[in-house]
C-alpha cells in the first residue's frame, strides 16, 4: 500500500527548509513587527505552501509533462500557478491594483502645488542609478531595469515591469520593493539628515494649501491620463487604471464603484497577488546569488531616489521665491503615505510649528505617477 | 557584452523623458488651476439678477 502512497518528507530539501524559515520570518515580521501585514502574510504563506514538495500548487505542463514548479512558457496546472499565470503573467493584477490605488488617492495636494510633480520625477533618479549599478555587476539590461525600478518604491509597478522584462526575478524584486517600502522610517531619515542642515529642515511651510475645486479634481485624472499616455504610451495600463480609479472616486456619481475598487476589489487582488508571489519563491527560484544582488541594489536604488529628491528640492529653492522644506523631496519616492509621514515627523522635530504632511503628499503621489511613467519608458525602450 | 551606448541612451533618455513628461504635466495642471480659479471667481463676482 505504501508503494502507492507517497508523503512529501522524502522530497524535502535543505533549500525548502530554509525557505520555510524565510516564509515564517515574513509572517513573523507582519504579525509582530507590523511590517506590511496585508502583503507579507499572503506572501509568507505562499512561500511556505510552495516549499512543501509534491503539493502541485505551482505545477505546470511543459511539453506534455507535469512538473512541480511554475515554468515560464509552460501551461499552468496547479491552483496557485493558474492565479500566477493569468493574474501576473497576463499583467492583470498589478494594473487593477492601480485602479484601487487610484480610488484611494487624493490628488488635492498635488493639484494645489503642481511643481511637486517635478520632485516626483526627480526622485526617479535612483531607478536609473541602480540600473547602472546592476549593469556594472553583471546583470543584463532587462534585469537591471527590473532591479532599478525598486527605487521607485512602488510594488505593483515593480511587479508589472519585472514580469515583462525579467520574469525569473519577480519574487526577489517584489519582496525587496515591499520590504523597503515598509522600512521607509528606517532608511530615509539618515539620508535626509545627511543631506540637509538643521536650518533647512526647519524651513516653515504654511500648513494650508489652496482649496482645490471639484472641477479640478475631476479634470486632473482625465488630463493626466491623456498627457502621460500620449508621451509615454507603454505606461497606459498603469497610468490608465490609476487615473480611472481616481475618476471613480472624485466624480461624485460613482461612489459605489469607487468604494468597491478601493475596498473589496483591492483586498481580493491583494490576496491573489501576495499568495502567487510567495508561491513563486520556491527554493530553486529564490535561493540564488542573484537574489542577494537584487536586495543590495534595491536598497541602493531606494536610498539614491531619496537622496536625489532632497537634492532636487534644494536646487528648486535656488530659483523659487517661497522656499520649500527640502525634506519633502524625499517623499518623491512613491511609498504612499509612509514617506510623507516620515517627512512630516522629521519636520516637526526640527520645527514644532511645521505641518508638512499635506506638502509631502504632493511629491508622494507624484512619485507614483513618476514610477509608472518610468516603467512605461523602460517598456517602450526594452520590451 | 553590455552595449554601453544603448545603456546611456536608456538611462539618460529615460530620466530626461521622465522629467520632461512630469514637467509638462505640472505646467498643464498649473494652467488648468489658474483658469478654473479665474472662472470660479468670476462666477462669484457676477451679481444675481433680480427677476
Image (cartoon, coloured by chain):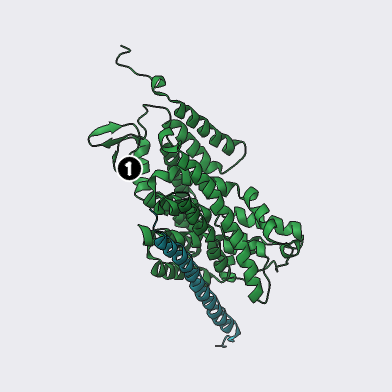
**Seen in the image, is A199 located left or right of residue B14?**
right
Does the image show residue A160?
A: no
Which chain is depicted cyan?
B
**Residue A131, percent across and down?**
48, 55
Residue A318 picture location, percent across and down: 66, 74
Quarter of the image for residue A86 reads top left
> The C terminus of chain A is located in which quarter?
bottom left
Q: Is residue A156 above or below residue A69?
A: below
| Number of on-image labels | 1
- Neighbours of disc 1 within 10 Å: few (<14), some (14-19), many (20+): few
Q: Which residue is tagged 1?
A: A72
Q: Position of residue A232 (x, y in %)?
A: 40, 66
Q: Which residue appears farthest toward the top when viewing the image?
A: A1
The green-coloured chain is labelled A
The residue located at (34%, 40%) in the rendering is A82
Viewer-closest of A47 and A271: A47
Q: Residue at x 59, y 62 (%)?
A: A309
The residue positioned 36% from the left and 26% from the top of the image is A54
Relative vertical location of residue A144 with respect to residue A248 in this rendering, above or below = above
Q: Quadrant of residue A382?
A: bottom left
Q: Quadrant of the N terminus of chain A?
A: top left
User: Please, is residue A91 above or below residue A347 in the view?
Assistant: above
**Is residue A23 among the parts visible in the rendering?**
yes
Extreme residue toward the left, this view: A64
Is label 1 in a helix, a strand or a loop?
loop
- The residue at the point 65 percent across, 55 percent down is A191
Identify the chain of the residue marked 1, using the numbered disc in the image.
Answer: A
- On the image, the x and y values in percent for residue A22 come to 52, 33
Q: Which residue occupies the foreground of this view, A39 or A64?
A: A64
Residue most extreme to the front: B1
User: Is A106 situated left or right of A97 in this image?
Assistant: right
Amino acid at each position: 500500500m505504501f508503494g502507492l502512497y507517497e508523503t512529501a518528507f522524502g522530497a524535502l530539501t535543505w533549500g525548502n527548509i530554509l525557505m520555510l524559515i524565510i516564509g515564517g520570518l515574513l509572517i513573523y515580521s507582519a504579525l509582530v513587527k507590523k511590517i506590511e501585514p496585508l502583503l507579507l502574510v499572503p506572501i509568507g504563506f505562499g512561500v511556505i505552501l510552495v516549499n512543501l514538495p509534491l503539493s502541485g500548487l505551482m505545477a505546470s505542463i511543459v511539453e506534455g509533462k507535469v512538473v512541480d514548479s511554475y515554468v515560464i512558457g509552460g501551461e499552468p496546472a496547479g491552483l496557485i500557478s493558474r492565479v500566477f499565470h493569468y493574474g501576473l503573467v497576463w499583467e492583470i493584477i498589478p494594473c487593477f491594483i492601480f485602479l484601487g490605488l487610484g480610488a484611494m488617492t487624493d490628488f488635492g495636494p498635488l493639484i494645489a502645488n503642481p511643481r511637486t510633480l517635478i520632485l516626483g520625477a526627480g526622485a526617479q533618479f535612483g531607478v536609473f542609478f541602480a540600473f547602472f549599478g546592476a549593469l556594472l555587476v553583471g546583470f543584463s539590461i532587462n534585469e537591471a531595469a527590473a532591479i532599478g525600478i525598486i527605487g521607485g518604491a512602488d510594488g505593483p509597478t515593480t511587479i508589472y515591469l519585472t514580469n515583462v522584462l525579467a520574469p525569473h526575478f519577480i519574487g526577489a524584486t517584489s519582496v525587496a520593493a515591499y520590504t523597503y517600502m515598509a522600512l521607509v522610517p528606517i532608511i530615509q531619515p539618515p539620508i535626509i539628515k545627511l543631506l540637509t542642515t538643521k536650518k533647512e529642515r526647519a524651513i516653515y511651510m504654511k500648513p494650508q494649501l489652496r482649496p482645490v475645486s471639484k472641477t479640478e479634481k475631476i479634470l486632473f485624472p482625465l488630463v493626466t491620463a491623456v498627457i502621460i499616455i500620449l508621451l509615454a504610451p507603454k505606461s497606459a495600463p498603469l497610468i490608465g487604471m490609476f487615473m480611472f480609479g481616481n475618476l471613480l472616486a472624485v466624480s461624485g456619481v460613482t461612489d459605489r464603484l469607487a468604494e468597491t475598487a478601493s475596498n473589496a476589489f483591492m483586498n481580493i487582488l491583494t490576496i491573489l497577488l501576495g499568495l502567487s508571489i510567495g508561491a513563486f519563491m520556491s527554493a530553486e527560484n529564490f535561493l540564488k546569488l542573484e537574489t542577494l544582488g537584487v536586495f543590495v541594489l534595491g536598497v541602493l536604488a531606494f536610498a539614491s531616489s531619496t537622496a536625489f529628491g532632497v537634492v532636487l528640492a534644494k536646487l528648486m529653492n535656488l530659483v523659487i521665491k517661497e522656499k520649500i522644506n527640502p525634506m519633502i523631496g524625499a517623499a518623491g519616492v512613491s511609498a504612499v503615505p509612509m514617506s510623507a509621514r516620515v517627512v512630516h515627523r522629521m519636520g516637526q522635530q526640527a520645527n514644532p510649528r511645521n505641518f508638512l504632511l499635506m506638502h509631502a503628499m504632493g511629491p508622494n503621489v507624484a512619485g507614483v505617477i513618476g514610477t509608472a511613467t518610468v516603467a512605461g519608458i523602460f517598456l517602450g525602450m526594452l520590451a | 557584452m553590455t552595449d554601453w551606448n544603448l545603456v546611456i541612451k536608456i538611462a539618460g533618455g529615460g530620466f530626461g523623458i521622465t522629467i520632461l513628461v512630469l514637467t509638462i504635466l505640472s505646467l498643464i495642471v498649473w494652467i488648468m488651476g489658474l483658469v478654473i480659479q479665474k472662472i470660479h471667481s468670476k462666477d462669484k463676482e457676477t451679481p444675481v439678477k433680480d427677476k
